[in-house]
Each structure stands twice: as C-alpha cells, then as structure tokens.
Amino acid sequence: MRKLKFILSGGGTGGHIYPAIAIANELKSRFPEAEFLFVGSKDKMEMQKVPQAGYKIEGLWIAGLQRKLTLQNAMFPLKLVSSLWKSRQIIKNFKPDVVIGTGGFASGPLLQIANSMDIPTVIQEQNSYPGITNKLLSKKANAICVAYENLERFFPSAKIVFTGNPVRQDLLDIENKRQEGISYFKLDSNKKILLVLGGSLGARRVNQLIEKELDFLLSTGIQIYWQCGKLYFEEYKHFNEKENVQVVAFIDRMDLIYAAADFVISRAGASSVSELCLVGKPTIFIPSPNVAEDHQTKNAKAIVDKNGALLIKESELDEKFETVFNQLIHDENLQKSLSENMKKLAKPNATKDIVEQIIKLIK
C-alpha cells in the first residue's frame, strides 16, 4: 500500500490547533506509515504547539483583517497573494491525499489552493456560527464536519456531517479519577471545588470578576482552582497566599482537574464547550464579547437553550453573578439536571467520525 499524505491547517488559538492535532493523532493510529504536514500562520501559537505534539509545520505570512483601518489591513492583499503562492508550492511539493482545515487564517489560502488543484478537502467547523473563511471555503469542500445543528443556512446541506468537535481522548473516562485529581492538585477532599477557566492566554474580565468576588466565593465554603492564563499570572499569583485558593497560568492535566471539580466557570470557546459537555460538570458560561461574530455567546446559548448550563453576559456580571452562583451551589437538583442535560449533548466519538469522513475521500 502506498504511503498516505495529509496536510492539516488550523491556528491562531488553541480552539483551532488542538482539534487539528486530535485529528492527526487519530489518522496516525489508523495509518502509522502516513506522512503529516501542518500549515499555520507564521507568528501564531501553532508554530510552537504543533512541533511539541510531534508534527512538522510550515508557516504562511497571513493574518486576519482588523476591524479598523490599520497598516495590517493595508498589508492584507500582499499577505494573501504571498500565502496563496506559498500554499501552491507546499501542496505541489508534498502531494497530499486530503487537506483538512480546522479554521484560522492559514486554512483559507491553503484550502482554496487545494480546491483549485482538485485535491479533496474537509472543513471542521467548531462553532455554532461559522467564520467568514469557512463560509467561503464550504462551496468547494468535499465534506463539512460540524459540532452544532442547524448550520444549513451557512453551508451546502448535502456536505454537512454532524460529528461534534474533537476533544482530548483522556477526558472520555474521568469518572474514577476524582481522588487522583484531588491529590495531584493538592486539593482538600472535604470542600467543594470551583474550577475557573480563562483560556490559554487568559480572560481579563473573568479574572477581574474572581478577584472582586473572591471573599464572597470563599464565604460559601468552597475552594478555588483558578487558571488565569499566562498573560495575567504575574498580576494574580499573589492570591496563592490565600487559604483555599490556587492560581495557575495553565493546567497540564485537564482530565484530572475536570475529574476533581464540582463546578466550573468558563469562557465559551468551542473546544471548552465540547469538553465540558463530555465531563458534564455544572457550569456558568461567561462568553467573551470580543470574538468575531460573537461566536462564544452563540456556542453557550446552544447548551443553555437545552438546559445544560447557565450563562451570564459580561455586561450583567456585577448585578447577577452572586445570585446565580448562590443558586447553583445550593440547589442540588439544579446541579444534577444541568449535568445530565449537558452530557446528552456530548459527542464522544467526534474525532473517529471526522476521520471516517476523511478516509472516504482518499482516492
């Protein structure tokens, strides 16, 4: 059998990178001899994260359009032409069987060129409201793997496959890891644990909220494991001196912290939402309003509308947070129903199902 070759492109944020790595890992387990190449944006985090996961990556000189007039925007046409040209070179040299895009700026030019060269392409759309790049690419893509229902208004319905988002495989079985999690993170097994997730870089407004509400939160008798993000760690690390508070920049064992946690406060990026559905912990979503097309609010609402989580808008935190949090931690029936409803929305086989779609396209 000839050696199969796959190009994967996704980046800018962990939400685009980790799904691409999960898909590559699943393909590799099916085709151990296959060759893989990632394509990302030159100065973005994928240039570190992908090699750490053991894959080669090439960078394109590309960035998105800013919302206001900037030098960046003036450079955009030049960057686009450069990226299209380099994408053509990469594809000609590597000769992939299938090209897979998980979103982010680099996947635009790459999949555009693959489509023009008649190489099969698969789009993996993580959000409940697709970005502009994937909407444009969908016309020529062979398959579009989505994580939310009702995306026919954005994509050709014949190509849509409802797979869910790829998630870390170690989250599939956390039921019996609670004690391990508590001892790994040096938590107190007699107190309920609130996990605060601010994303890999951090979420300023979530951090400000926890700082402001810290005494209120501790007065409810819980302990807090607070991932503030690497941009904010210096600012918040002094709270480690407080009893029942741990502040970290990032978390290396998400499976164990999810297993230990009783409640979660989180942003609503697509990957976080998919992971939380899988682990089913009672969650308050605080969507970021600063994300393109307000993706996060739409992602969170898809869960909240099915009674799987609670949602507080940033603009309403000051008036609503204490009431909502009090209600959550004191109402065990609410906790139970949120948890059960959230788990119903999980798609634990997403990565395998996406790979099945990719395999169908190998000529």
Image: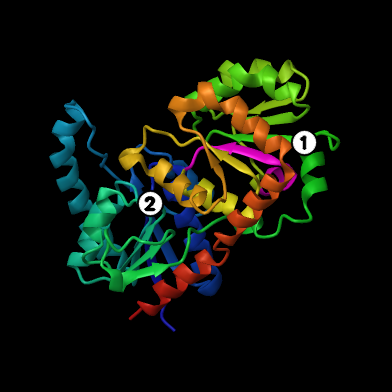
Q: Is residue 258 magenta?
A: yes
Question: Sequence-wise, which precedes: disc 2 or disc 1?
Answer: 2
Decide if residue 20 is on the left or right side of residue 41. Answer: right
How busy is the neighbourhood of tag 2: few (under 14 within 10 Å), some, or many (20 plus)?
many
* Residue at image coords 30%, 53%: 107
For the residues carrying marks 2 and 1, which lies nearer the camera in this image? Answer: 1
Tag 2 and tag 1, C-beta contact below 8 Å: no
Q: Is 37 rendered above or below residue 310? A: below
Q: What residue is pinned by disc 2?
A: 10
Q: Nearer the viewer, residue 128 or 38?
A: 128
Separation of marks 2 and 1 at Cα, in angstroms: 37 Å
Decide if residue 226 is on the left or right side of residue 203. Answer: right
Residue range of the region highlighted in magenta in the rendering? 255-268
* Residue at image coords 30%, 49%: 131
Q: Nearer the viewer, residue 269 or 109?
A: 269
Residue 319 appears in the picture as rendered:
yes
- Residue 203 image offset from top left, x and y in percent: 49, 29
Q: State the scheme by which the image is colored.
A: rainbow
* Residue at image coords 59%, 49%: 276
* Residue at image coords 67%, 30%: 326
Q: What residue is pinned by disc 1?
A: 192
Q: Is 212 rendered above or below residue 130? A: above
Decide if residue 352 is on the left or right side of residue 145. Answer: right
Residue 232 appears in the picture as rendered:
no
- Residue 77 image offset from top left, x and y in percent: 13, 41
